[in-house]
C-alpha cells in the first residue's frame, strides 16, 4: 500500500554505501565486454582515453595491474612494458549512464538512491535506508541482499551501513573489502577515527594531511576547527562534520520523493505477460486508493518493473485528465506492455507505480438522464487510449491563443498539454470540443464567416480613401462587384508580442469588411494598414467566405 514518505529525522540516519571496485572496470566500462568474458581472457586488458598528453590508460583489469601497469600511464610506455596488452576505448558517458541504471535498480531497497561516480574502480551507489531496513529483516539482511544482487550481475561489490553517508562511504571503501562477506554495519560514529583521511572525500587535501603526519581521521577529529580551515580549507571541516553527523548531508536521489507510490512484491517471480498485467492492475488499485483518500488524480505515471537479475524496465504514460480509476490505468499500461515487448528474463519480482504528477480531483456527480452532452470523462479516456496507441505528438486539440488576428487566434497543440492559466479546470487538459466563453463580455462576439482561410490571400480592390469599403475586387483572377458591405471591424496588431515591430514588414492595423457581391456571394476582406498613418498604399486580402 502506498503511504506518504516522512521527512528524515534530524538525528543521524542509517545510510548505505555500496562500492563497485570492478564496476566500472575495464570490462564493464567498455559497454562491449562483460565480466565473465574478461575473466576468461589471458592477456592483460585496459581501457584508454585521449588526453592533452596523448592516449593514456583509463582503467585496468587484474591481470594488467599484476603486470605493473597503472591508470594514467602513457599507452606507448604500457605497450613497451607489456606487448600483449589488449586495448579498447573508454566510454565515460556510458559508464555514468550504466551506473545510474544500477542505482535505479537499487530502488527496490529504498526510494532514495543515487549514483556515486568516481575514478575507474571507485564508483559506488548511495542509499538512504531510514525506515526501510525492517522490511528486509534488519540492516544486515538488507545489505546482504543488495550485495548479493549486485554480485549476481557479475560485479565485485562490497558495502557498509552507518549512521551518516560520509561514514558509510569511507567504511565501504576502506573497511568492507577486508570484512567477512565484504560488508560492515556500524552504529557508532567512533568507527570513523581509525579510517584513513582519504575516507573523508577530500581529494588532494588528503595527501597534504599525510605530509603533516595526519594519516587517520582520529588525528584531526579533535583539532581546532579554525586552524584546520586556515591551513587546509573549509571543505575539510565540512566533510568531517558531515561524516560525524554535526552537519546534515542531504542525498540527492535519482527519483524525486512522492507521497503517491504503490509496490507489490512477489515471492514467486512473474514469468508470463498475463500475470504481469494482472499485477499492474493490483498495484494500481493500491495507488488509486491513496489518491482517492487525498482527493487527487494522476496525470503522469511511472511503472517500474524489477527483474530477478537486478535489471529494471520503465514505462511512462500521461493522462488527458486527472484519473484514479485502476481499471483505466491498467488498460493503458496493457497497451504499452503489448507494444514494448518487455524482456521478462527470469521473472519480475516487484512492480512499482509512482504518480509523478497529480492534480486535484473531486467527486463527480453523474446525471440521472441523458441530456445529449458529451461525457468529459469518456472523452478523456478515449484521448488517453489514442495517445498510448499513436503517440503524444499525433493526437492534438484546438486551443485559443492570445491574439486579435483571426489567423493567429487558434492553434493545434498536443492533447496532453494543459492550457496555460493560473488554475486549470478538472478536464482542461483533455481534447476539447468547445471552450467556455468568458463570464462577462462588454461587446457581443464578432461575426465570423463559415470558412476562414488558413492564410489570407492577396486581392486587388477599388475603395474610397482613407477607410471606405471596397467597391469591387479581383481575387483568383475573377472580378467581383460589391453590392453591399458592412464594416469596418478594426483590429490592432498584437503589440505585446516580442519583435512584432522589429520585422522587415511591421504588423499593421486591419480593417475587416463583410461584403456581398451582385451574384450573392459573401466574402470577408480586410485592408492591411491605415492610409496616411501606416502606409500610402494599403493592401487588400481575402480572409474568408460564407
Image (spheres, helix red, strand yellow):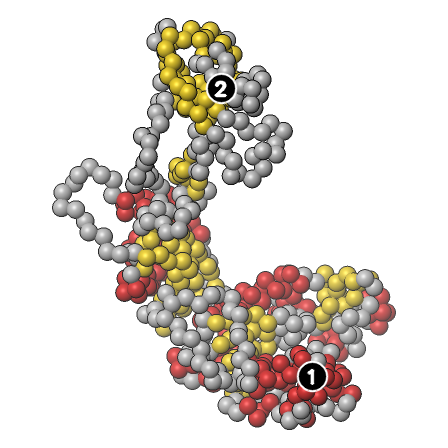
- Above or below — where is 471 with respect to 543? above
Residue 289 shows in this picture: no
Q: Quadrant of residue 47?
A: bottom right
Q: Quadrant of residue 280?
A: bottom left
Judged from the image, the secondary structure of the residue bearing numbered disc 2 is: strand
Whole-percent x, y for residue 21 in the image = 63, 76
- Above or below — where is 118 with respect to 510? below
Q: Is residue 62 left or right of residue 248?
A: right
Residue that appears at 37% across and 7% down: 483
**Foreground: 390 or 246?**
246
**Foreground: 16 or 66?**
16
Circles 1 and 2, Cβ within 8 Å, touching? The answer is no
> Cα distance, mark 1 to mark 2?
75 Å
Q: Quadrant of residue 137?
A: bottom left
Judged from the image, the secondary structure of the residue bearing numbered disc 1 is: helix
The label shown at residue 229 is 1
Where's the N terminus, which quadrant?
bottom left
Whole-percent x, y for residue 46 in the image = 73, 68
The label shown at residue 431 is none
Where's the C terminus, which quadrant?
top left
Whole-percent x, y for residue 36 in the image = 61, 70
Determine which residue is flagged by label 2.
527
**Foreground: 440 or 249?**
440
What is the number of callouts on the image?
2
Residue that appears at 42% across and 6% down: 481
For disc 1, the neighbor class at 10 Å (few under 14, some 14 to 19, many from 20) is: some
Q: Nearer the viewer, mark 1 or mark 2?
A: 2
Residue 116 shows in this picture: yes
Residue that appears at 72% across and 61% down: 89
Amino acid at each position: 500500500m502506498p503511504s506518504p514518505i516522512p521527512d528524515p529525522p534530524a538525528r543521524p540516519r542509517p545510510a548505505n554505501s555500496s562500492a563497485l571496485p570492478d564496476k566500472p572496470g575495464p570490462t564493464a566500462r567498455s559497454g562491449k565486454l562483460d565480466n565473465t568474458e574478461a575473466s576468461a581472457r589471458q592477456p592483460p586488458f585496459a581501457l584508454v582515453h585521449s588526453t592533452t598528453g596523448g592516449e593514456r590508460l583509463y582503467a585496468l583489469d587484474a591481470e594488467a595491474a599484476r603486470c605493473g601497469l597503472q591508470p594514467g600511464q602513457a599507452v606507448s610506455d604500457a605497450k613497451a612494458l607489456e606487448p600483449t596488452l589488449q586495448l579498447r576505448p573508454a566510454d565515460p558517458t556510458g559508464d555514468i549512464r550504466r551506473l545510474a541504471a544500477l542505482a535505479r535498480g537499487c530502488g527496490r531497497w529504498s526510494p532514495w538512491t543515487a549514483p556515486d561516480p568516481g575514478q575507474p574502480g571507485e564508483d559506488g551507489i548511495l542509499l538512504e535506508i531510514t525506515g526501510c531496513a525492517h522490511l528486509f529483516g534488519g540492516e544486515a539482511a538488507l545489505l546482504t541482499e543488495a550485495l548479493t544482487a549486485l554480485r549476481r550481475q557479475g560485479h565485485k561489490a562490497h558495502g557498509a551501513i552507518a549512521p551518516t553517508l560520509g561514514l558509510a562511504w569511507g567504511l565501504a571503501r576502506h573497511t568492507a573489502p577486508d570484512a567477512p562477506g565484504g560488508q560492515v554495519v556500524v552504529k557508532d560514529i567512533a568507527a570513523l577515527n581509525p579510517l584513513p583521511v582519504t575516507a573523508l572525500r577530500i581529494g588532494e587535501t588528503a595527501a597534504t594531511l599525510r605530509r603533516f603526519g595526519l594519516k587517520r581521521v582520529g588525528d584531526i577529529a579533535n583539532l581546532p576547527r579554525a586552524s584546520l580551515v586556515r591551513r587546509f580549507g573549509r571543505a575539510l571541516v565540512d566533510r568531517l562534520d558531515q561524516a560525524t553527523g554535526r552537519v546534515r548531508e542531504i542525498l540527492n536521489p535519482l527519483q524525486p520523493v512522492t507521497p503517491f507510490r504503490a509496490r507489490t512484491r512477489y515471492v514467486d517471480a512473474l514469468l508470463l505477460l498475463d500475470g504481469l498485467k494482472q499485477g499492474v492492475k493490483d498495484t494500481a488499485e493500491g495507488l488509486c486508493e491513496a489518491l482517492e483518500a487525498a482527493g487527487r488524480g494522476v496525470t503522469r505515471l511511472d511503472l517500474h518493473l524489477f527483474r530477478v537479475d537486478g535489471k529494471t524496465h520503465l514505462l511512462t504514460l500521461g493522462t488527458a485528465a486527472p484519473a484514479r480509476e485502476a481499471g483505466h490505468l491498467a488498460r493503458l499500461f496493457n497497451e504499452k506492455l503489448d507494444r514494448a515487448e518487455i524482456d521478462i528474463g527470469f521473472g519480475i519480482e516487484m512492480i512499482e507505480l509512482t504518480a509523478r504528477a497529480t492534480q486535484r480531483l473531486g467527486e463527480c456527480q453523474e446525471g440521472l438522464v441523458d441530456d445529449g452532452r458529451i461525457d468529459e470523462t469518456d472523452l478523456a479516456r478515449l484521448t488517453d487510449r489514442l495517445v498510448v496507441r499513436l503517440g503524444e505528438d499525433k493526437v492534438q486539440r484546438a486551443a485559443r491563443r492570445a491574439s486579435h488576428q483571426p489567423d493567429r487566434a487558434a492553434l493545434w497543440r498536443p492533447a496532453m498539454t494543459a492550457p496555460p492559466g493560473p488554475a486549470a479546470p478538472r478536464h482542461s487538459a483533455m481534447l476539447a470540443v468547445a471552450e467556455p466563453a468568458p463570464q462577462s463580455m462588454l461587446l457581443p462576439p464578432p461575426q465570423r464567416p463559415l470558412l476562414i482561410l488558413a492564410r489570407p490571400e492577396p486581392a486587388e480592390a477599388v475603395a474610397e480613401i482613407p477607410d471606405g469599403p471596397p467597391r469591387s475586387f479581383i481575387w483568383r483572377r475573377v472580378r467581383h462587384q460589391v453590392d453591399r458591405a458592412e464594416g469596418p471591424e478594426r483590429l490592432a496588431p498584437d503589440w505585446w508580442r516580442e519583435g512584432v515591430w522589429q520585422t522587415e514588414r511591421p504588423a499593421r492595423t486591419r480593417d475587416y469588411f463583410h461584403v456581398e457581391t451582385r451574384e450573392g456571394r459573401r466574402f470577408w476582406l480586410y485592408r492591411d494598414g491605415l492610409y496616411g498613418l501606416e502606409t500610402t498604399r494599403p493592401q487588400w486580402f481575402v480572409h474568408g467566405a460564407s
